[in-house]
Amino acid sequence: MITGTKVLKHLDNLMERRPVTAQIQLDNFCNNFCSYCRYVGMPSKEKRSITLDEFKEYVRILLNMGVKGFILTGGEPTLSKDFDNITAWLEENEIPYGINTNFNVLKLIKPRYLKISIDGYDADSYKAVRGIDKYETVIRNLETYLKWKKENGVKTAVGIQKLGLDVEECRRFYEAHKHLDVDYFSFRPVESVRHSYYDTNDEKPVIAFLESLRQTDRRVQINYKYYQLRTCFEKCYGNFLQIAVNPNGDVIYCCHKSNEIVGHLTDPDILKKISEYDTNMETCPVPCRMTGPNALVRDMETSTNDSMFI
Ligand SMILES: C[S@@+](CC[C@H](N)C(=O)[O-])C[C@H]1O[C@@H](n2cnc3c(N)ncnc32)[C@H](O)[C@@H]1O
């Protein structure tokens, strides 16, 4: 998760307006059909996976730009053809990466973090949200992974994610999985255009519940965006801190805007193209992963001329 303060660890990137995190969509297809997924409209005329050679080229370009961490996503990243070779190459070269996956397919990998979107708490609730009967498979995969992780002293932070819709659902999700040796439970707010979801849904009971749960189990993470659900920006101030690449190697304005192609990663002037690109903030999901960084960069850019007096 990119929060504003995390970015302060990478002051050079911040001052030189270079990306800290690259989000790479390894493919454009998925084996789940989530009711809430904003990527459903991804331009995917034909199925496409990034090959190992392409991936290596992209990562070299991104490292040269100053990128520190790579998020593998999709579609569903574990389905991409060269997934095993790509993760093995990242690990051999000690390149920090994390992965967002539904884990319907077991992968014994060693990312910095492995975040598994589960959403459900039993077969029916899983199917209701994710459109497929795979709850038992995911839990089995997760248990196998956790056992392997322990036996091999693997440091990967393993988290399971639920979109925090209402209290009862969050409670059931926690109760169903609290016995698992995961490192964190990620409860995440719904991201919708102009926060439309939260115009009709009150977040306060969910936040109060999650806060009380966290008192008893520190593994419960309340995504910081819960506290900024309606924060909109007139421009994406911190966009330069991330870079998102689709399976064709195109740079998209951000991972939320698959249809807005800014250029190709191999374009020598791609950073300039990104900086000159203007997006319509009215179409942005709110909140978004840039909510924290946007606030930080906006404050820096608009700080008054007494900023030297603290
Ligand atoms: C599109 S998925 C791709 C990776 C993988 N297939 C998965 O299921 O995690 C990436 C993340 O986006 C999140 N996501 C998609 N649409 C969302 C929305 N409208 N609000 C909040 N999160 C969303 C998913 O929950 C998931 O954690």
Image (spheres, helix red, strand yellow):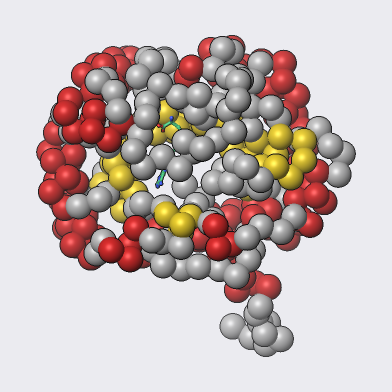
Name the residue rendered at 47%, 47% in the picture.
1
Name the residue rendered at 47%, 36% in the picture.
40
Tell me if residue 117 comes above or below residue 212 in the rendering. Answer: above
Residue 50: quadrant of the picture? top right
- Left of 48 or right of it: where is 54? right
Tell me if residue 251 comes above or below residue 310 in the rendering. Answer: above
Rendering coords of residue 138 (x, y %)? 28, 21
Q: Nearer the viewer, residue 1 or 290?
A: 290
Rendering coords of residue 271 (x, y %)? 79, 47
- Residue furthest out toward the right: 268
Q: Nearer the viewer, residue 24 or 192?
A: 192
Tell me if residue 22 comes above or below residue 149 in the rendering. Answer: below
Name the residue rendered at 19%, 46% in the picture.
170
Q: Nearer the viewer, residue 52 or 180?
A: 52
- Residue furthest out toward the front: 45
Rendering coords of residue 171 (x, y %)? 14, 46
- Left of 102 or right of it: where is 66? right
Quarter containing the C terminus: bottom right
Residue 244: quadrant of the picture? top right
Q: Is residue 25 visible?
A: yes
Name the residue rendered at 55%, 35% in the picture.
42
* Quadrant assignment for ligand 1: top left
Rendering coords of residue 21 (x, y %)? 61, 43
Q: Number of numbered discs present?
A: 0
Q: Is residue 66 visible?
A: no
